[in-house]
Structure formats: C-alpha cells, structure tokens
Amino acid sequence: MKRILFALPAMMLAGCAPAATTAPGEAATAEAPALSPAETLHQSLMVLDSHLDTPAYFHTAEYTFSKRGSFEADGTHVDLPRMNEGGLDGGFWVIFTTQGPLDDASLNAARTAAILRQISIRELAAKYANDVELAFTAADAERIFASGKKIVFQSMENSYPLGKDATLLETFYVGGLRMVAPVHFRNNQFADSATDVTAMFGGLSPAGEELVREANRLGLILDGSHASDDSVRDMLALSTTPIILSHSGPKGVYDHPRNLPDDLLKAIADDGGVIQVNAYGAYLEALTASPERLAAIAALDAEYGTDTSTMTPETIAAYRAARDEMDKNFPPPRSTFEKFMEHLLYTLELVGPDHVGIGADWDGGGGVDGMTDITDLPKITAALLEAGYSEDDLAKIWGGNMLRLMRAAEAAKTATISSPVPLN
C-alpha cells in the first residue's frame, strides 16, 4: 500500500527531524494534527490521474522530480514530495507533441521529439527506481501500488508524430505506451479537433480509422479528449473496446468546444467508457482577462505571431520565456474548486460513478483557486463523501474505472508482439 504521509510540508519535515526534548517547566511541543477521516480514506485509496503533463518539465534546469516545488514559485503541480502529500499514486504520464505542418520534415521532427519524450519518462523510472516504476498492465499498477511506489503509465496526447500511418504505434507500445489520443488543438492527419476552426474530415480520417484499429490490435486505450464530437462518435463506432476522455468535461455545465454534450457522454458510458473530468479553468467557465493582460497578449502576438508550428526552436524558447514572464506580471484569471466540483458532480449524476474519474490536466494548464496543485487532492475525496458517494464509489473514481478500461484493452488485444521492455 502507499506510504502514508501527512498532508502538510511541515508535518513531513517533522517526521525527519530529531525527537524534541522538553525541559522541566517548558511547554510541550504541539503534535501535528491527525488526518481527518476523509484524508485517511484518501491516503488508503489508489489515486490515479489520467493526464499528467509533467514530462514537459523533465530535462529542464528548473525542475527536479525529487524536490518539492510550488505553483506559486515555479508554476509546477507535480513532483514526488507533493505526490506523497496529496496521496497521488501516479497515472498516465504524457508524451505530448505540439501540432505542426504535415510535411515530411515536420513529421520526422515530431517523431523524434515524441521518442525523446518517451525516453525521458523511462529515464525517470530508472533514476528514481526506489520510488516509481513503469506500469504496462492493470496488474502492474496494483502490484506497484502495494509496494508503496508511484505508478508510471504512458499516454500519447496528439498522434501527429506517428506520421502518415499508424504502424509506428507499435514502437511506442513496446516502450510502454498504453493510451493514445488521435488529435490535439488543431486538426491533423488522423482526426478533426474540437478546437480547430473548420473540420477537415467530418470526424476521423481514413488514417484515423486505421489508428483506432491498430490501437485495438495492440491493446491501447483510446482517448477522445481534444477530438471533435464527430471524431469521438467515430471512435465509439469503430473501437472494439470502451474509450476514455482523459481530461474533458460536460457541455451541460459550460458550453465550450472542449466539453461534450450529454448525449455523447452517455454514449461513452453506455459503451463502458470513462469520462475523466479536468480542472482546466478555461473549460470550466468563461473567464475574462484583465485589460493589462489582454494588452500584454496583443503585444506578445505582435512580436512572435500566434502559430508556433512555424517558429524555430530558438524562437519557441524565447516565446515561452516571454509568455511565462507575462503570466507572472499579469496572471490569467482562474476558476475555482467549487466550479470544478460542479463539473465533476454533474458528470457523476449524468453517467454514474462507474464511468467517471479525474484527469485534472496537471502541469498542462490545470489547477484552480482552492486546488492549486496535487496536494489539494484530498479535498475532492472530502467533497465526494459529503455529496453522498461511498468508499467503493471513490475507489472506482480515483483509479478503478481507469484500470477496468486497461483490462478491457488487454483482453481484446490481438497483436503478437515482443514483450514490453522493463527497467531493472
């Protein structure tokens, strides 16, 4: 089972400090407060998140997985100390590639970037082998959880780096990939995006249909987040296993293109799938930036443009640095924990606890006031208990539903391929 740690940094430090001694007449040092019943339950559950964008920080000078960061200081959400504090046992760590042009040179560059990102995730597991472990199956996740280590599944957000056919998917599978999403912010060669201006295919392209078949053959979970509604419907129609939305939400609470209508959410659930609710503020409610921030964005766009796919790596680095500086000077508006819970409870009421989970989009733009990073995850458990959900429900929501999909994909797998490469 997981290593139980108190929820506050000071409590963690107290466990490592020498025992305090009290001289006669001195007041005894106050003990750290005990965990609440909700916190105790939270720490006992297998808590997984289906969309951790943290690998984007790997190999950067400012980030060390074993050191505690803070959103206020460095903008990050996830590291090992905070995983312990917040009771996060792991989940799907993302191989993300920015959408670019569909020419051969760009596709080859994207392929290389995706392979390097997968290598960086595997390097994490090797470097911190006492604390984390790669998972390839649902049974692996249960074994790793029982050992007290963190679970490292891999997912791919945006299949753009697979190029012009889906055969490269097997290479990533052998390296540990277990979830794949066809598309991101813009249409690509596989599918229409929920947030592009106009549709290219009216759903999946022929290559996208082949991607679905290849994912089913290999035993990968299909992820419909970021895909257009028609693309999701095509995935439902073609896939031999249930699909997941790794970080999405209900249009019934907030009408945004990234959110899905009730009928489609119900169709996913009726097929056995799972909706993992995100905490990305712009998808939770309409947020209005300050005039100063809007002016700063306009100045940034005038200097760099808005299409990162045409920028050189040096320009992208400069753009991101300027964007980070702008965010510090003129912070973006933020949604709230209450609004996140409204989305989560709405989805639970709509499709039931057998088909809902959490994919907050940590280190990818997620986080709200009242739930700044993963140390606040016990608040979700407390709120769900208060709303009347049982311990069994919480076990499903926090990880059980996602592992059920993993088992379904494993059972339906038809490919005969080499065994995944473990790390010793």
Image (cartoon, rainbow, N blue to C red):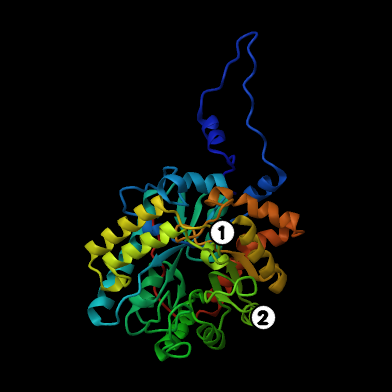
Name the side, left or right, on which 235 lies relative to 307. Answer: right
Q: Position of residue 105 (x, y in %)?
A: 22, 78
Q: Earlier in the sequence, mark 1 or mark 2?
A: 2
Between residues 133 and 422, which one lies in front from this camera angle? 133
SS category of the residue bearing label 1:
loop
Q: Position of residue 205 (x, y in %)?
A: 42, 89
Q: Position of residue 403 (x, y in %)?
A: 58, 66
The answer, for residue 122, to whether it is visible in the render is: no
Which residue: 45% across, 57% down? 363
Q: Are marks 1 and 2 in contact (CB under 8 Å)?
A: no
Which residue: 41% across, 74% down? 158
- Please give the count of numbered marks on the rendered protein: 2
Q: Residues within 10 Å of mark 2 (few under 14, many from 20)?
A: few
Give the label, 1 or 2, closer to the camera: 1
Q: Residues within 10 Å of mark 1 (few under 14, many from 20)?
A: many
The vertical placement of 99 against 19, above or below, is below
Q: Quadrant of the C terminus?
A: bottom left
Q: Which mark is residue 388?
A: none
Amino acid type at mark 2: Asp
The vertical placement of 143 against 345, above or below, is above
Name the side, left or right, on which 355 lies relative to 71. Answer: right
SS category of the residue bearing label 2:
helix
Q: Which residue is mark 2?
A: 270
Q: Which mark is residue 335?
A: 1
The vertical placement of 313 against 25, above or below, is below
Q: What whole-number distance in Å separates the C-alpha atoms at marks 1 and 2?
A: 30 Å
